[in-house]
């Protein structure tokens, strides 16, 4: 009997030891999981920051696709575009980016630089059109198409534009991820795709409805101050949209120029990056205060100037060479900017 009790006592001791081991494993797993999760979110934040210029451009561009359409259709149209954007990023571009990084990693930098050239062209073209405006009227477009066909046409155009911008976002994000672990890369890209799409189209939905909110407040406000605030919202929305467009243009030139400069450095031409870095450090040292911020401002400004110069050089190439060539294969498309 005493032997049986001793055996049971040993079994209990082993069970306690096993439970302790399992508890330790669970604790370690939780710690590792927390670190991995934090790493994924940190990488996603860095990647999203790198793609900031494209994100701002995306948010600035999308509201034009609901201009001239019934107010009741604005949110459904934005949802259609957002849903397609989720699909493009998660189902098409995410696997394509991982396959590219796995089998053709040398192609990432040239593709990034190609996307950077696109950003520089878009930003420079916007500035060019300020001084050489195009005659474009959504009202005239609406007169030639009924509401259903106009909406369908706008949604298709928005989805195509979003696909181009999404490809840039995913490529830039992939290059910014600081790990070679495929699972982590996939998780980071998924977080970036979901977060950026929700942010962009959530912001767009708010923007396109702000004038409606202001109009309702101006009519139905209980007190005079509320009605005055509503009228102010309605008056200021055009200015807000112009400001967003201006910031988006500056961000495109900054990010596009930065991508080109860093791409040249990766490919072995270090002089442009070293020169900008040297100038930024010199100015920051001369100012003597907030040196990190000053260096960033100088670097971003020089990147933007380079992006603008490159974009202006690309305008005749795109409009006089690429567009005529594309019109041969796609005669139904009108020559014009991507936006």
Image: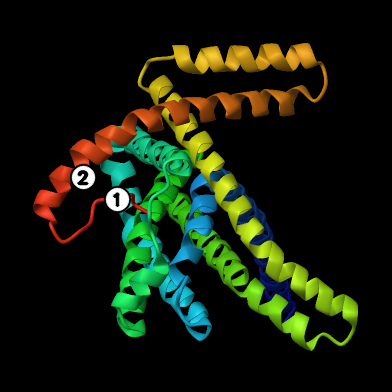
Relative horizontal placement of residue 254, taking residue 286 as reference (left or right): left
Image quarter (top left, top right, bottom left or bottom right) of the C terminus? bottom left
Q: Residues within 10 Å of mark 1 (few under 14, many from 20)?
A: few
| 216 to 7, vertically: above or below | below
| Camera-nearest residue between 152 and 189 | 152
Q: Residues within 10 Å of mark 2 (few under 14, many from 20)?
A: some
Relative horizontal placement of residue 315, taking residue 175 as reference (left or right): left
Q: What's the mark number on residue 182?
A: none
Q: Which residue is tagged 1?
A: 336
Q: Which residue is tagged 2?
A: 323
The secondary element bearing badge 1 is classed as: loop
| Camera-nearest residue between 103 and 206 | 206
| 100 to 226, vertically: above or below | above
Q: Which residue is drawn at 25% across and 33% down?
A: 317
Is residue 262 at least partly visible in the picture?
Answer: no
Image quarter (top left, top right, bottom left or bottom right) of the N terminus? bottom right
Q: Position of residue 54 (x, y in %)?
A: 48, 48
**Residue 143 falls in image quadrant:** bottom left
The Cα atoms of the two marked residues, 1 and 2, are separated by: 8 Å
| Camera-nearest residue between 38 and 265 | 265
Q: Which residue is drawn at 70% across and 62% down?
A: 236
Q: Where is residue 333 in the image (x, y as percent from the top left)?
A: 20, 58
Task: Give the mark nearest the N terminus, 1 or 2.
Answer: 2
Relative horizontal placement of residue 46, taking residue 218 as reference (left or right): left
């Amino acid at each position: 009997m005493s032997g049986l009790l001793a055996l049971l006592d040993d079994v209990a001791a082993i069970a306690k030891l096993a439970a302790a081991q399992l508890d330790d494993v669970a604790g370690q797993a939780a710690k590792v999981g927390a670190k991995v999760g934090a790493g994924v979110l940190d990488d996603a934040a860095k990647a999203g920051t790198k793609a900031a210029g494209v994100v701002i451009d995306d948010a600035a561009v999308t509201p034009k696709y609901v201009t001239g359409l019934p107010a009741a259709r604005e949110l459904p149209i934005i949802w259609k575009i957002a849903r397609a954007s989720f699909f493009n990023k998660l189902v098409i571009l995410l696997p394509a980016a991982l396959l590219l990084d796995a089998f053709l990693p040398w192609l990432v930098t040239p593709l990034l630089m190609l996307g950077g050239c696109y950003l520089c062209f878009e930003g420079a073209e916007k500035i060019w059109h300020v001084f050489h405006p195009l005659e474009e009227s959504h009202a005239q477009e609406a007169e030639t198409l009924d509401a259903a066909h106009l909406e369908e046409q706008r949604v298709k155009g928005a989805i195509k534009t979003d696909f181009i911008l999404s490809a840039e976002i995913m490529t830039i994000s992939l290059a910014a991820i600081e790990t070679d672990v495929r699972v982590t890369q996939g998780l980071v890209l998924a977080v970036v795709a979901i977060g950026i799409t929700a942010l962009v189209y959530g912001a767009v939905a708010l923007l396109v409805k702000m004038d409606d909110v202001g109009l309702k407040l101006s009519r139905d406000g209980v007190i005079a101050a509320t009605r005055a605030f509503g009228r102010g919202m309605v008056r200021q929305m055009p200015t807000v949209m112009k400001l967003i467009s201006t910031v988006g243009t500056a961000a495109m030139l900054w990010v596009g120029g930065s991508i080109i400069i860093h791409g040249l450095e990766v490919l072995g031409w270090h002089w442009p990056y070293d020169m900008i870095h040297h100038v930024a450090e010199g100015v920051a040292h001369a100012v003597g205060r907030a040196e990190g911020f000053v260096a960033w401002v100088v670097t971003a400004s020089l990147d933007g100037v380079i992006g603008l110069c490159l974009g202006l050089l690309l305008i005749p190439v795109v409009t006089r060479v690429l567009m005529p060539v594309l019109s041969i294969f796609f005669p139904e498309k009108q020559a014009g900017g991507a936006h």
